[in-house]
Amino acid sequence: MSPEVKAMLEEFRSAPMLDYTRPEVESAMRGALERVRAAFGTTYPLVIGGKRITTKDTFPSTNPASPSEVVGTFSKATVEQANQAIEAAERAFPSWSRVSAEQRAEVIFRAAEIARRRRHELNATMVLEVGKSWPEADGDTAEAIDFLEFYAREMLRWGSPASHPLTPNPGERNELVYIPLGVGVVIPPWNFPCAIAMGMTAATVVTGNAAVLKPSSEAPLTAWKVFEILEEAGVPAGVLNFLSGPGGTIGDALVEHPKTRFVAFTGSMEVGIGINERAARVPKGQIWLKRAILEMGGKDFTIVDEDADLASAVEGVYQGAFGFQGQKCSACSRAIVHEKIYDEFVERLKARTEKTVVGAPEKREVFLGPVVSARAEKTILEYIEVGTKEGRLITGGKKAPGPGYFIEPTVIADVKPTARIAQEEIFGPVLAVTKAKSFEDAVEIANGTIYGLTGAYYSRDKAKLAEAKRKLFVGNLYLNRKCTGALVGIHPFGGFNMSGTDSKAGGRDYLGLFMQGKSIAEKI
């Protein structure tokens, strides 16, 4: 191991959040916002095999707080170019796959350093491209840095034969090694455009695979900066290709290509199911079964039991429901509250929600910015209309003032467990509150959806806390804290049922999804 890598290998720790109350930190962020704004309207290319290609057919990425502002203009790839990107990755794969695990890890460690240097810029980009508040944007970038640091260390562990001990057999020398799969297609979402794009891409290349990064059309600029960071860090031309464009055309072509070995996707259930179906087909010329690594959303809950710390529970539900406008797969969209404290909980939550500062997130004090697009706004408002017929509107329920896609944080109480707003993922600042008769009733309601991603349970009763651990069926369960905010290496993230393949991003088994085991026995 090189001295440089040894120097980097302190025990993994999560990147601390920036403190924007410090004048110098706030000033640095304001400067970054100005610099990102100054680049508005720039046209960005595709990158195939290291070659930058600008197409005649383009599409804009706009500021959801002010939709007339074009954050960037992006080249729209064709199916032919999607095929070329896969072929470029296939050509680059053999040499990259033979680079040592240590050398690949060094590249990813360098990427972490570059991301730290460009942290304010990444944060400012997300504020302007997807409407994140300053803390939400910084949490996104911090998670991206954590993924880089964690996966680089993990690759060193996976690359060591000592990490895969075997039962001794007299007369033989045996080892188990893990080798890369081939060409991977990485399809990240717009809601964590830095962290998830960086995490899935870094996992792909650090394990020795080649990749085509196909960003969400709602957040291509952030993904472009992820590409730039990895390129600057030393990922070779062709090992990582950047392909912007509509998922319904180039996305399908990338998934279906016979040289695609695996797909890493985070997004909606509907799109994830479609990817799974397409990946399962075996076209002519394909000599493997493709892997699909999928995270597909949720209908996440917080249970507040009769003996809970009510102040803590209200704040946890509020933060979980309305952080980043509820546009998180882990967001609390259902509060399930014991009947004995139900009325008080609803009143306290109403008071807390009505203090929310809504507006353009370029202002540091704004908590709730715009939803990501006109389409998202329309869908959310339609769900609110449905919800007001299924329950009792407590607060919110309409568009908020401003030129962008602003929606008031909305609480709807007295919602039945089978109601649409209690079953379907809304992906917006809408919370359904349901009354539970008992602990058992609350558990049944919580488990009563097709999803199983995150959940939270508030109680002071140790016996009930133990029962909650056993009975609540989610991939990430939180006790006496909010259901959002998973940390890399601390809360491996991924869910059950229609929430995906429980791939556990940020966990110690995650890189194994991007490799295959090879057992070698030598007679001695």
Image: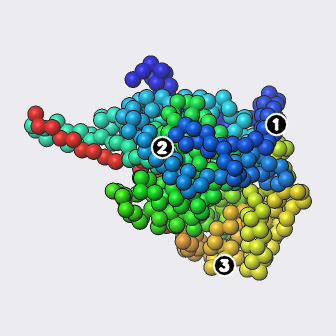
* Residue that numbered label 1 is attached to: 38
Question: Residue 330, located in which quarter of the rendered image?
Answer: bottom right
Secondary structure of the residue carrying tag 3 is loop
What amino acid type should be assigned to the residue bearing mark 3?
Answer: Ala
Residue 178: percent from left, percent from top = 33, 42
For label 3, the crowd category at 10 Å Cα-Cα, with few meaning under 14, some 14 to 19 and many 20 or more, is some
The front one of 401 and 35 is 35
Quadrant (top left/top right/bottom left/bottom right) for the N terminus: top left
Please indicate whether residue 498 sits to the left or right of residue 215 in the image: left
Secondary structure of the residue carrying tag 1 is helix
Residue 216: percent from left, percent from top = 64, 53
Q: What's the residue at 62%, 36% (across, down)?
A: 228
Q: What's the residue at 82%, 36% (across, down)?
A: 38
Residue 101: percent from left, percent from top = 40, 33
Q: CA distance from mark 3 to mark 1?
A: 46 Å
Question: Residue 127, located in which quarter of the rendered image?
Answer: top right
Which residue extends farthest top? 3
The front one of 89 and 149 is 89
* Residue that numbered label 3 is attached to: 419
In the rendered view, tell whether residue 152 sits above or below residue 220.
Answer: above
Whether residue 150 is visible, yes or no, is: no
Secondary structure of the residue carrying tag 2 is helix
Q: Earlier in the sequence, mark 1 or mark 2?
A: 1
Please indicate whether residue 216 sits to the left or right of residue 103 in the image: right
Residue 48: percent from left, percent from top = 55, 42
Assess whether mark 2 and mark 1 are in contact (beta carbons under 8 angstroms). Answer: no
* Residue that numbered label 2 is attached to: 88
Q: Nearer the viewer, mark 2 or mark 3?
A: 2
Q: Earlier in the sequence, mark 3 or mark 1?
A: 1
